[in-house]
Amino acid sequence: MTTFASALAVCTALLTSAAAFAQDKLPNVTILATGGTIAGTGATSTTTVGYTAAKVGVERLIEAVPELKKVANVKGEQVFQIASENMTNEHWLTLAKRVNTLLAQPDVDGIVITHGTDTIEETAYFLNLTVKSTKPVVIVGAMRPSTAISADGPINLYNAVTLAGSKDAVGKGVLVSLNDQINAGRDVTKANTSTADTFRTPELGFLGYMQDNKPHFYRQVIRKHTAETEFDISKLDSLPQVDIVYGYANNNRIALDAFVKAGAKGIIHAGVGDGSLSNAMKPGLVEARKAGVLIVRSSRVGNGIVARNGEANDDELDFVVSDTLNPQKARILLMLALTKTTDSKAIQKLFYTY
Ligand code: DGL
């Protein structure tokens, strides 16, 4: 072999091993795909409503963003393929168990979950309460289908994988990242029916931003989450039935009575204002409590603390208040609380802890 050829061979070998070394240095991130718009397809490139969610598989989502290889060693699993309005307690239990199994593996550094945006905030809070690891778990979605002009899925997925592989995201709880922003799973909510900036943490604010291929954090959640959680779903196949009744002018107790008759173990009352109870609704809640149903006063307002003994004498009625959790998140915490206790004082403590 000539000197040049042997030099070329040596250089090639060195470059190959350098590339392999660099790839080995990248974090290992598993993408768990569940469906939603990020996997959606529309009839035309300008179809941004009226498209079909949950059509594109996880491998296709990964192939569509070759840049992922620069930031992580990525593997994909199709856990479900559903529009997220169809997410159920059983889906959550399956997902949480898979997340915990993967995060217990030393060769998994972080997880990304692709998800429909309609119930991202609920799945994020459920996992915030059931993931038993400090490793990053990032939930991501899109507001435009994969076939649309300026589809936001690819950049959201790239940012989510970058975030899930970042040491800065360790111990921050479950994160929701779309639109270059980083939100906490506990406090984030979908605030607009259709715009790309829909995920907000209205008063408590974002945790930070995704910019220039890395996360920039400015605050963190102080409520307990993930590795600190006392909830263990590893042996659960179902969750107690908890339903939500909505407060509004001229409301009634018909739906409440139906939920209780159907066997609800807990009721979240999404009251007007500071969780106020109308004269039409209150007797039904009092009767339900006396029958052993846990009652949580939440608010339809969406921000602020529902104060204990404010709009109702919770001590006397033996009700619980939701603190700052919106009704759909209060339902999640009450379901998990009821897997451990039916003591209202212990449950109130959980609402002030998580
Ligand atoms: N069907 C809705 C869902 O799967 C579409 C919304 C979205 O994913 O952005 O949540």
Image (cartoon, grey):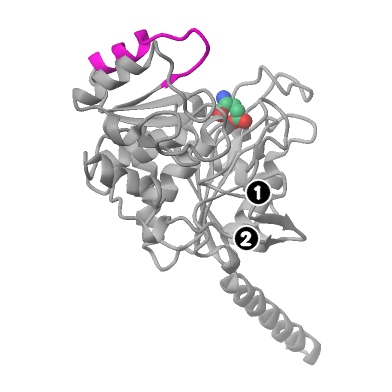
Which numbered marker is on residue 219? 2
The CA span between labels 1 and 2 is: 9 Å
Query: On the picture, is 215 further left or further right than 305?
Result: right
Residues at discs 1 and 2 in contact (Cβ within 8 Å): yes
Magenta highlight on residue 340: no
Q: Residue at x 64, y 74 (%)?
A: 22
* Label 2 packing within 10 angstroms: few (<14), some (14-19), many (20+): few
State the extent of the magenta-drawn residues as a range.
Answer: 245-261
Q: Which quadrant of the view contains residue 217?
A: bottom right
| 348 w.r.t. 310: above or below | below
Q: Please state the horizontal and vertical placement of residue 2, each as a whole percent of the image.
A: 77, 89
Q: Residue at x 28, y 21 (%)?
A: 286
Query: On the picture, is 90 further left or further right than 81?
Result: left
Residue 55 shows in this picture = no
Q: Residue at x 26, y 32 (%)?
A: 240
Q: Secondary structure at mark 2?
A: loop
